[in-house]
Amino acid sequence: MKAKPEVPMDVRLMNAAATALFAAGAVLLLAAGGVQDLYGAAAQKQLQLLLGSTDVNASVPRTSIRRLTGAKLQLMARVDHGAYRFEDPEFQSWVAARRTVD
């Protein structure tokens, strides 16, 4: 039986980073679409559809929101638990005009 070749660590990190950015884009789409509770079960179901994965749990929006509200990006700001607003209304309009995460 042949052993599977090991995937180099840098490739795994790049894949993880790409997945995280893809999820952040999906969270932006939900927020721009008016979803208020980004941590709720309904938002998680929408994320599953957008990401094409059933492996979506509460950590996906939490990690994405942490990235989107962090010092580097500062794209969103917390309004209330699970509720966020865009820092730039023009960016929100641009995101809202999109239909898919790409």
Image (cartoon, rainbow, N blue to C red):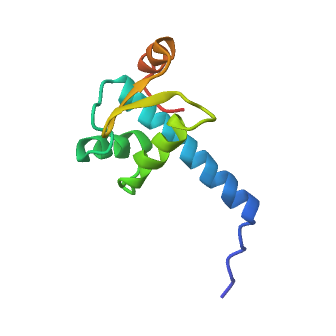
Residue 69: horizontal and vertical position, in percent? 51, 35
Quarter of the figure with the N terminus: bottom right
Q: Residue at x 52, y 27 (%)?
A: 75
Task: Report whether 5 appears left or right of 54.
Answer: right
Q: Give the total of numbered labels.
A: 0
Q: Is residue 27 above or below residue 53?
A: above
Residue 92: tell me if it is visible.
Answer: yes
Q: Is residue 82 above or below residue 7?
A: above
Determine the image quadrant of residue 27: top left
Task: Report whether 10 appears left or right of 32.
Answer: right
Task: Report whether 3 appears left or right of 76.
Answer: right
Q: Residue at x 41, y 54 (%)?
A: 59
Nearer to me, 27 or 98: 27
Q: Residue at x 50, y 34 (%)?
A: 25
Q: Is residue 19 above or below residue 6?
A: above
Residue furthest out toward the bottom: 1
Residue 5: horizontal and vertical position, in percent? 72, 74
Residue 14: horizontal and vertical position, in percent? 69, 52
Nearer to me, 83 or 6: 83
Residue 33: horizontal and vertical position, in percent? 34, 24
Residue 52: tell me if it is visible.
Answer: no
Quarter of the figure with the C terminus: top right
